[in-house]
Image (cartoon, helix red, strand yellow):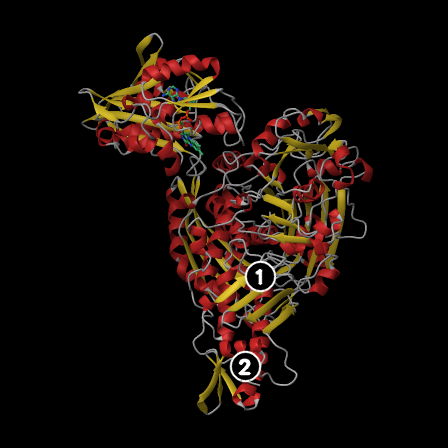
């Protein structure tokens, strides 16, 4: 059978993003812009304490205030206080404490919801919070993971009698045997600090009973309208077929909007109870404490090798901070990293243990990369430390141990099968772009002259797993959902195309990329294709957007549905052209009789025939549309080589990224400009972890970095111009040959930066620098090394 | 992030402003660019009953040449000040310091007079005003008075401007010495961890006189007087570095998330040397 002949295709072209004009011209529709008649605004009284008994709560004073419609504590809310769901019970004996929307009797984190006020204006709601009477009896806060696990520690949840949420083990091969054989064992403790997602648009949710039916529509600034609909139905008891969830324009998410939040549950329940629209938009101050955080792991990592640099085995022992409660995939995030510690390296054994720990802090959950940045950081750092230990060039050590391009498909010690990759090619290209040898020479010269500004080179040769995931694999990991994605393609009678996708973009450019895929198969111009998404009323099936899955999984569904549509159209066209379907070829959006180009019918004309249905072949149903629901056969494994030239001012501790080169291999690129954009944003976010960002708490569990004056996020002014390049090694498990790109930059860049700083200072005796590598931290590290050398 | 309700009055003369402040009583506040005041209101750290907007008083806008000095209206924006030709010619240090304030959007709204009246110890403008020997014109119910820079900054967020008074303008004696503002911060938009504002008079390769203001080393911006004295006669980088070792003398550095006091003191020494070297060309 002949399929589409690709002549002039939009696939692979760096065309401008369709969605940008709308975004740049202020025509966006953020959730907070939605104004429905009769709306009441919700304001939340949040706990100022990390751990306390609520000894008194009286909301009646608020009810007396002007404009106030209702006020509730947990008692008043009763069974509308439905628990925040966790869908990833990673072990059979995991402890899953209740997580009510409004705290019952006890608060467990600063920012815990204690009471809500609903009023006719947002200002009236906020004003009335002052009239709620609440008393607390402070309890000792659990803030340190190691102390939390000691017997006698205060407990975050008394009823589960421990702060250990779970222990997960994955032994692969015999690590102790590898260790016994090794000449060298290097062990390090890395702190992968807590991060705050800080997307640009704070969260916002509006829920409204729709009047004419039992439907409640929920507009939420979310990454996951489809998953949220299922979860809200389960939590609130509102029938799923009465819930419609819409994600309007969404201003960033980075995993922070991959969640079913307590505020979403409260707004939905209260809209139903009050019979009118309810709206809540978080302030930036609330965002810092009440939106889930990311990372926060203590990583003990040990690598065993021969003295000439052959890696034998790896042992990883994690403490992963859950925070006060489990949210959607809180326990699972470290497991997304579990498979990736061995990374691109061949070895005999790998031993992984992770203990999840409750503390009186904001819950953690997915944040750009979710698990894989942690893994990549630890392995790329320890490989550099091993190189230093045995006196080998760090790039040579990598080359000696990585999977070579002729060894793919390769099953790693962690049990994953990487389909394709070419680490040699990406590295060679990156080294050439970087002027590696020139910078090494300059480094030597600066060291020799004792220059106050030292130079270091940081390497990160990373791979990751994305495109979550075959549903069967997710089931085996006890994840309570699938990894499939859906698409419906419709050819409308007027010749326009609708692509209905289950992915839910919030900045990634799906409208453009999905149009390019459909255009290349249907032969219809990109402008004539409309991508419909992020509304369960218009796009009923989907698993949404996270984990770099949208193209890697959703893109396959676009391809399959488009191809099915062409096959249905072919049958109709053959009937119209009075030939057999196999006599037709499909060129530039038109069916042509082979050898007789004068006899042809365009796809639009076929769509019109399918609409009138006056003359369809027997057995063919009217309308021209096709669906596909695709379960991926495997993860995808993008990889790349990132190189950072780091200048360190040894007098002040200030570091500067002088040059940043990265060559990423994300397989086939649907739109290289979007790929570059994703790499830029990702690299910036990874550098942010290395140098700027870090959530800090005091001993009482107060968040110290509670505003953007203290939680520093970099802007363009703080970053160099990135030199990006790509190699293309198509994936063989994904029909388009694509791999994910949404998280690659974030995963790769953090260790490149820290390796570069350590490399600049190693001759002074520095062997590690804590993140974020603030000037003070770097300066103190240098001072300590100097002291040590005395 | 919603302030408590307040009244708003826009005035067009100093007299109107003074009466409005009087009418508003204790809780009345002046608003200029709102870049420091509004965040405070939104966090409900202050709850003024009335805001008096002085942004349209002609006398408080723009920069004028007064012969031996230039006078800057307190309501002139940071953007206006740093790009003003008179400021660039006669008080370059002020332009250099102002250019490091926040980001362009904030510099288009925020005013240099507002920054001086606000007197944030981490603000960049006060150190430059000290080093340039600025003087301040303050108007109140009792008329006008002029206060020298050394008497203007009293304490943490406190200046010589009383609650019923207005900062009208400030003047800077024309200064053609070399100048430089060194701001040490973690991101381009962040507040200074430490700042050093230097003007240096160099004759024949030798420092004759230097004036240095330090940002965020005490409850107010302060002069690094010991360094200033030690610099006289310096003609080499090593001598400047040695003089700058006194930069933390007499300071009262605090500790916060970004820097503990000892690190601030260390930074003050390093960046004072750098500011003086850049200003002097030595
Ligand atoms: C995100 C952000 C970052 C910033 N970063 C920096 C920085 O890096 N460096 C820096 O120096 N500053 C920074 N600022 C502050 C900025 O400089 C402000 O513009 C300035 O501090 C206040 O000027 P304003 O005109 O906005 O004053 P307003 O906010 O209007 O007023 C500030 C205070 O001064 C009083 N006031 C104002 N004008 C007068 C007057 N004429 N007479 C008497 N009292 C008056 C007000 O009553 C109020 O108490 C930043 C601000 C923001 C929002």
Residue beneath label 1, please? A550
Residue beneath label 2, please? A3
Q: Is residue A583 above or below residue A422?
A: below
Percent across and percent down for residue A550 are 58, 61
- At 48% across and 29% down in the image, what residue appears? B39
Q: Give the CA separation, mark 1 to mark 2.
A: 24 Å
Q: Is residue B123 visible?
A: yes
Q: Is residue A606 above or below residue B257?
A: below
Q: Nearer the viewer, residue A623 or A296?
A: A623
The answer to whether the residue labelled 1 contacts the one labelled 2, judged by CB atoms less than 8 Å apart, is no
Q: Quadrant of the N terminus of chain B?
A: top right
Q: Quadrant of the C terminus of chain B?
A: top left
Percent across and percent down for residue A726 are 46, 64
Q: Nearer the viewer, mark 1 or mark 2?
A: 2
Which chain's residue wears label 2? A
Query: Would you identify the image quadrant in which residue A190 lies?
Result: top right
Q: State whether discs 1 and 2 lie on one chain.
A: yes
**How many residues crowd around disc 1 within 10 Å: few (fewer than 14), some, or many (20 or more)?**
many
Q: Nearer the viewer, residue A775 or A27?
A: A27
Q: How many marks?
A: 2
Q: Secondary structure at mark 1?
A: helix
Q: Is residue A104 visible?
A: no
Q: Respond yes or no on whether mark 2 lies under 8 Å from ligand 1.
A: no
Q: Nearer the viewer, residue B233 or A562?
A: A562
Residue farthest to the top?
B142
**How many residues crowd around disc 2 within 10 Å: few (fewer than 14), some, or many (20 or more)?**
some
Percent across and percent down for residue B99 are 33, 34
Q: Is residue A123 above or below residue A594?
A: above
Ligand 1 sits in quadrant: top left
Q: Secondary structure at mark 2?
A: loop
Looking at the image, tell me whether mark 1 or mark 2 is earlier in sequence order: 2
């Amino acid at each position: 059978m002949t399929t589409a002949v690709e002549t002039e295709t939009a696939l692979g072209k760096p065309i401008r993003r369709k969605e940008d004009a709308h975004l740049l011209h202020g025509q966006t529709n953020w959730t907070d812009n939605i104004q429905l008649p009769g709306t009441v605004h919700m304001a939340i009284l949040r706990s100022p304490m990390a751990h306390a008994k609520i000894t008194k709560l009286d909301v009646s004073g608020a009810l007396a205030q002007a404009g106030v419609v209702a006020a509730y504590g947990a008692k008043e809310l009763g069974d509308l206080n439905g628990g925040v769901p966790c869908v990833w019970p990673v072990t059979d004996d995991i402890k899953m404490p209740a997580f009510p929307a409004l705290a019952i009797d006890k608060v467990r984190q600063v920012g815990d919801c204690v009471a809500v006020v609903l009023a006719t204006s947002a200002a009236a709601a906020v004003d009335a919070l002052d009239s709620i009477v609440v008393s607390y009896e402070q309890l000792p806060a659990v803030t340190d993971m190691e102390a939390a696990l000691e017997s006698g520690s205060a407990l975050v949840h008394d009823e589960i009698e421990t702060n250990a949420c779970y222990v997960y083990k994955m032994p692969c091969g015999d690590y102790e045997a590898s260790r016994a054989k090794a000449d060298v064992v290097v062990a390090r403790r890395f702190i992968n600090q807590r991060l705050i997602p800080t997307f640009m648009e704070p969260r916002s949710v509006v829920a409204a009973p729709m009047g004419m039916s039992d439907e409640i529509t929920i507009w939420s600034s979310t990454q996951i309208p489809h998953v949220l609909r299922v979860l809200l139905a389960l939590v609130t008891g509102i029938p799923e077929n009465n819930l419609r969830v819409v994600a309007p324009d969404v201003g960033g998410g980075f995993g922070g909007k991959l969640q079913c939040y307590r505020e979403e549950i409260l707004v939905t329940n209260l809209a139903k109870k009050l019979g009118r629209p309810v709206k809540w938009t978080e302030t930036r101050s609330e965002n810092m404490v009440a939106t889930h955080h990311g990372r926060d792991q203590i990583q003990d990592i040990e690598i065993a090798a021969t003295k000439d640099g052959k890696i034998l085995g790896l042992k990883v022992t994690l403490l992963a901070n859950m925070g006060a409660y489990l949210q959607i995939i809180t326990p699972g995030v470290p497991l997304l990293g579990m498979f990736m510690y061995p990374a691109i390296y061949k070895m005999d054994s790998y031993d992984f243990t992770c203990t999840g720990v409750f503390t009186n802090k904001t819950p953690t959950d997915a944040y750009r990369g979710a698990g894989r940045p942690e893994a990549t950081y630890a392995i790329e750092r320890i490989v550099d430390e091993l190189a230093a230990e045995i006196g080998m060039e760090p790039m040579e050590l990598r080359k000696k141990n990585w999977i070579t391009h002729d060894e793919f498909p390769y099953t790693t010690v962690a049990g994953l099968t990487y389909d394709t990759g070419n680490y040699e090619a990406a590295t060679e290209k990156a080294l050439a772009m970087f002027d590696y040898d020139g910078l090494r020479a300059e480094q030597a010269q600066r060291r020799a002259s004792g220059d106050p500004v030292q130079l270091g080179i940081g390497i990160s040769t990373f791979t990751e797993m994305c495109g979550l995931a075959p549903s069967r694999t997710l089931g085996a990991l006890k994840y309570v959902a699938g990894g499939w994605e859906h698409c419906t393609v419709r050819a409308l009678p007027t010749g326009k195309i609708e692509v209905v996708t289950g992915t839910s973009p919030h900045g990634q450019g799906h409208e453009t990329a999905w149009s390019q895929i459909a255009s290349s198969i249907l032969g219809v111009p990109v402008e004539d294709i409309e991508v419909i998404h992020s509304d369960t009323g218009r796009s009923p099936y989907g698993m949404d957007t996270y984990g770099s899955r949208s193209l890697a999984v959703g893109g396959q569904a676009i391809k399959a549905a488009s191809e099915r549509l062409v096959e249905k159209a072919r049958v109709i066209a053959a009937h119209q052209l009075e030939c057999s379907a196999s006599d037709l070829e499909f060129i530039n959006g038109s069916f042509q009789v082979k050898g007789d180009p004068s006899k042809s019918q365009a796809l639009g004309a076929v769509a019109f025939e399918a609409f009138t249905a006056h003359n369809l072949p027997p057995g063919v149903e009217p309308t021209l549309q096709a669906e596909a629901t695709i379960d991926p056969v495997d993860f995808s494994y993008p990889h790349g080589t990132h190189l950072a030239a780091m200048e360190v001012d040894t007098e002040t501790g200030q570091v500067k990224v002088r040059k940043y080169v990265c060559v990423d291999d994300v397989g086939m690129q649907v739109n290289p400009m979007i790929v570059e954009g994703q790499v830029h944003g990702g690299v910036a976010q990874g550098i942010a972890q290395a140098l700027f960002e870090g959530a800090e708490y005091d001993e009482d569990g107060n968040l110290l970095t509670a505003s953007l004056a203290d939680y520093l996020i970099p802007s363009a002014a703080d970053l160099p111009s990135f030199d990006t390049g790509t190699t293309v090694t198509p994936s063989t498990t994904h029909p388009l040959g694509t791999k994910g790109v949404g998280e690659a930059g974030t995963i790769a860049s953090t260790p490149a930066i820290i390796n570069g700083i350590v490399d600049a200072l190693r001759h002074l005796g520095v062997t590690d620098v804590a993140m974020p590598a603030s000037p003070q931290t770097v300066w103190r590290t240098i001072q300590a090394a100097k002291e040590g050398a005395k | 992030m919603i302030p408590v309700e307040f009244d708003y009055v826009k005035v067009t003369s100093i007299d109107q402003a003074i009466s409005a402040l009087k009418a508003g009583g204790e809780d009345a506040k002046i608003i200029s660019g709102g870049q420091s005041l509004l965040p405070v209101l939104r966090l409900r750290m202050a709850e003024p009953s009335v805001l008096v907007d002085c942004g349209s008083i002609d006398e408080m806008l723009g920069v004028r040449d007064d012969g031996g000095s230039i006078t800057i209206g307190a309501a002139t924006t940071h953007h206006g000040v740093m790009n003003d030709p008179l400021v660039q010619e006669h008080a370059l240090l002020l332009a250099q310091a102002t250019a490091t304030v926040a980001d362009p959007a904030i510099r288009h709204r925020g005013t240099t007079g507002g920054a001086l009246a606000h007197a944030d110890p981490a603000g960049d403008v006060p150190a430059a005003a000290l080093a340039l020997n600025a003087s301040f014109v303050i108007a109140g119910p009792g008329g006008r008075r002029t206060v020298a820079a050394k008497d203007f900054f009293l304490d943490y967020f406190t200046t010589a401007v009383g609650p019923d008074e207005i900062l009208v303008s400030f003047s800077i004696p024309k200064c053609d010495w070399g100048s430089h503002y060194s701001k040490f911060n973690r991101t381009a938009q962040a507040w200074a961890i430490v700042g050093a504002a230097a003007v240096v008079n160099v004759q024949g390769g030798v420092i004759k006189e230097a004036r240095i203001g330090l940002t965020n080393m005490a409850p107010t911006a302060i002069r690094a007087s010991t360094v200033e004295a030690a610099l006289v006669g310096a003609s080499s980088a090593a001598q400047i570095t040695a003089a700058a070792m006194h930069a933390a003398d007499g300071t009262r550095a605090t500790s916060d998330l970004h820097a503990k006091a000892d690190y601030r003191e260390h930074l003050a020494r390093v960046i004072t040397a750098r500011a003086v070297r850049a200003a002097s060309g030595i």
